[in-house]
Amino acid sequence: MTKRIQLMIVGAQKSGTSSLLRYLAQHPDIHTHAQSEMTFFLQEHEYTQGYDRAFAKYFAGEKIADKPLIAKNVMVMHFREVMQRIYDHNPEIHLVVLLREPVARAYSAYWWARRRGWENIKTYEEALATEKARLNEDRFKWRQCGYQYNSIYYPHVKNLIDQFGRNQVHCFLTDDLKENAEGICQQLFNRIGIRDDFKPSIGERHNQATMPRSEGFNFLFTQFLASRNPLRKAIRKLVPDAAAYKLRKAVLDWNERPQKDENWTPPPLDPETRKQQMAYFKPFNEQLAELLDRDLTDWL
C-alpha cells in the first residue's frame, strides 16, 4: 500500500503556511513535496488518476523509508467534498490551520492574486464588489479571488473539527507563528511521532509581497495554464509533471525578478473599506473565538 500523508496544512492562504511548511520540512525525519502546493485532492483531473500517480509526482525521488509525509494545500478547507477525500485517504491525518486577522488576509490575498495573474481588476474595492457574482458563477474557478469568503474561518474550522475531531485539528494564529514558530513545529513533530527536540532554522520568509514586471503577461499565462486549449493539452502530454512545475515556476519567476524589491508593500487599505470589513467579519470572529477558546479581541 502506498504511504499515506500524516500531516497536512489546509489553510488559510496568505497566513504564513509556506513558511511553516519549510520550517517543518527541515526535520531530518520528515518528507514533503518540492511544489508549493499538493493539489491532488483539490484538482479533479489529478484525483481521478489516483493517489499512486500523485505519490510519484509529489513524493518520489528519494528514499523516504519510514519518514512521515507532510503536505500543504491552503484551499482545501473551503471545500467540504475535498476534505472528505482527505478523510477517505487517512482518517487519522493531522490537519494544521493557520489563521491571520481576516481583513489583513483578504487584502493580502488580493495583491497575491494580482501578482499570480488570477486577478485583473485594478482596485480591491471593485474586486470585492464582484466577488459574490464570481463565486456564484463558479466557486472553484474563482476560488483564489474569494477574498472575503476565504477569510470567514468559523464554518470551515468547525467542519474540520466535527469531521476529524479536535485532537487532529491544530489551529494557530499567524501571530503565534511569528512569536513561537519553533514551539509550534515541535508540537507538531510530537503529534506525528518523531523526535520533538529538533530546532528548525527560523527566519526566512516565503511568498513575501512583490509584483511582476507585467501583470498582463501573468494574467494571460495563468489563463492559458487553466484553459482547455489543445496546445496546452499537447504540451502536458509531452512534459513530465515535475518538469512542467519547474517550467511554470521559472516563467513566473522570470517575470518577477527584474522588479523584485524587498521593501515593496501594497498601498494602505482605505480606512472606510477596513471599517466595513471589520464589521462584516465581526460575528464570524466572535463564533471562532468561542469555538477555539481564543481571545480574538484584536480582530473585533
Image (cartoon, rainbow, N blue to C red):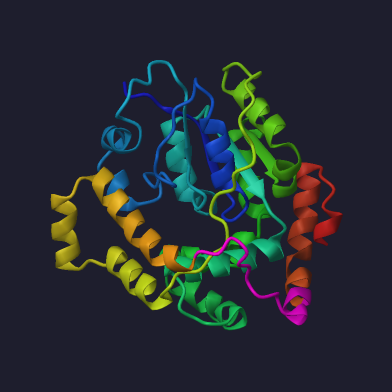
Camera-side residue of 149 and 27 = 27
Residue 17 is covered by the magenta coloring? no
Q: Which quarter of the image is occupied by the C terminus?
A: bottom right
Q: Which residues are magenta?
A: 260-275
| Residue beneath the point at 84% across and 57% down | 298
Q: Which quarter of the image is occupied by the N terminus?
A: top left
Above or below residue 269? Residue 43 is above
Position of residue 238 in the picture relative to residue 287 (left or right): left
| Residue beneath the point at 39% across and 44% down | 35
* Prevailing secondary structure class for the magenta stretch in the rendered image: loop
Residue 131: in sight, yes or no? yes
Where in the figure is residue 87, as x and y percent of width and height?
48, 36
Where in the figure is residue 99, as x and y percent of width and height?
67, 50
Above or below residue 111? Residue 46 is above
Residue 163: in sight, yes or no? no
Where in the figure is residue 295, as x and y percent of width and height?
85, 48
Above or below residue 89? Residue 190 is above
| Residue beneath the point at 56% across and 54% down | 13
Residue 261 is covered by the magenta coloring? yes
Above or below residue 238? Residue 58 is above
Position of residue 252 in the picture relative to residue 92 (left or right): left
Where in the figure is residue 54, as x and y percent of width and height?
31, 38
Camera-side residue of 284 and 20 = 20
